[in-house]
Image (cartoon, grey):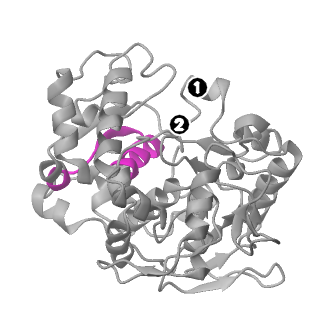
Amino acid sequence: MNFYPLVFVHGFNGWGEGEGINGVLPYWGATTGDLVKYLRREGFDAYSASVGPVSSAWDRACELYAQLTGGTVDYGEAHSKKHGHRRFGRTYDKPVIDGWGEKDENGNVRKIHLIGHSFGGNTIRLLDHLLINGSKEELDASGEDVSPLFRGGHGGIVESITTICTPHNSSSIYKLVTSLKLFDLLLVFTAIYTGTLGRSALNGKMVDFHLEQFGLSNTPGRKDADSYFRSIRTFLKNSEDTCENDLLPESIFNFNKTVKTNENTYYFSYPFDSTKQGKITGLRIPILKSNPVIAPLGYWIALQKEFTNNITGQVYNDEWRPNDLLCNTVSEKYPLGEAHKDYDKNVSPEKGVWYVMPVQTGDHGTAIGLFANKEKTRAFYLSLADLLRKLN
């Protein structure tokens, strides 16, 4: 048994507990109430981090590291030059996890559990990878003047990684986005949306876009964004450094070639499915309780015939039809090629292996309590917290 802190990391377009919107609609818990506060009342040391809602996994991992350890966000000299943005971001005066990675009075290393929803799962996987392996590119670019994150050698300070509705192998929804040429339109909308709100009084109070590295948003408490149109052009010119780009199949394919499981960490994944086999048509359709706003996307994914991505060679077939209205259920189970097992509560889990939990009924939002049953949502997360506490 352990009493390590639980750190929750949101997905695309999400937010953390430090933002004003979380008091109105908590990301973790949504319409069922704040799950982080609930877990604290149940005796768990829980936190909800806030990282760039539309930023790349790399930028988000750097922000998460600075937030947890305290200090200034360092995106890396090599990375920043490659993607045309500032190397340093905001400064966190106090660490969220005091003494993380250090030994306590009993000589035991202070560890954490990382839990990510959707793209938050990709973020925490990359953070753990960098903690262990560092970055040769950043070391070559900066030498001694480099963030401790890029030095590596910090294996064993993340006890577990849990992903919920994470598209480990992308989603077949990308076919719709690319075939309708929506990718560029989505990026333009993102730039205008974040560039407008990010320099308003709402940034840092109600929302926080964490895009000061691009000059697209103000640092909370300061008015330091670049000129509106210049910052938008910079962001669009470097669109590879965004969440949207990181979710493309070819991007995740390359991500998975680099980011692997390690022998120091436990891995758990929770896949969701919001579809069923239609009795009349025999076609897969969203269940009645699915979110009506995104249910059409679930229909589209479920109706896709087999096709192959020419870049990755990934074949999308009948196994990819079940989905949570945004991501294929099978993609949420584990990164293809990684060691994995179906979770068995009667068998003690091993480190370095993905344990696939039973498929949960619900959509991408149900997983975090959006339009969900309050008791079931709380029971789900309490069960997860208990599972992680019982790890040796």
- Disc nearer the start of the sequence (2/1): 2
Residue 233: image quadrant is: top left
Q: Position of residue 315 (x, y in %)?
A: 45, 83
For the stretch drawn in magenta, what is the main secondary structure?
helix
Front residue (pair 147, 181): 181
Q: Identify the image quadrant of the N terminus.
A: bottom right
Task: Tell me which amino acid carries mark 2.
Answer: Trp
Q: Nearer the viewer, residue 46 or 210?
A: 210
Residue at the extreme front: 280
Left or right, 152 with respect to 383, comes to left
- Describe the element under mark 1 as helix, strand or loop: helix
Q: Residue at x 88, y 46 (%)?
A: 375
User: What segment is highlighted magenta in the picture?
Assistant: 59-79
Between residues 307 and 221, which one lies in front from this camera angle? Answer: 307
Hey, what amino acid is under mark 1? Answer: Ile
Name the residue beneath numbered marker 2. Answer: 15
Residue 68 seen in render: yes
Q: Position of residue 136 (x, y in %)?
A: 20, 68
Residue 178, x across and y down, in percent: 34, 59
> Where is residue 129, by image quadrant?
bottom left
Mark 2: few, some, or many residues within 10 Å (few <14, many ≥20)? many
Q: Is residue 223 above or below residue 75?
A: above
Residue at 14 percent of width and 53 percent of height: 82
Whether tag 2 and tag 1 are in contact, CB under 8 A, the answer is yes
Q: Quadrant of residue 276?
A: bottom right
Could you tell me which residue is drawn at 21 percent across and 42 percent down? 236
**Quick one: label 1, few (<14), some, or many (20+) residues within 10 Å?**
some
**Circle 1 sits on which residue?**
21
User: How far across and down, in percent of the image, does residue 305 sit?
Assistant: 52, 77
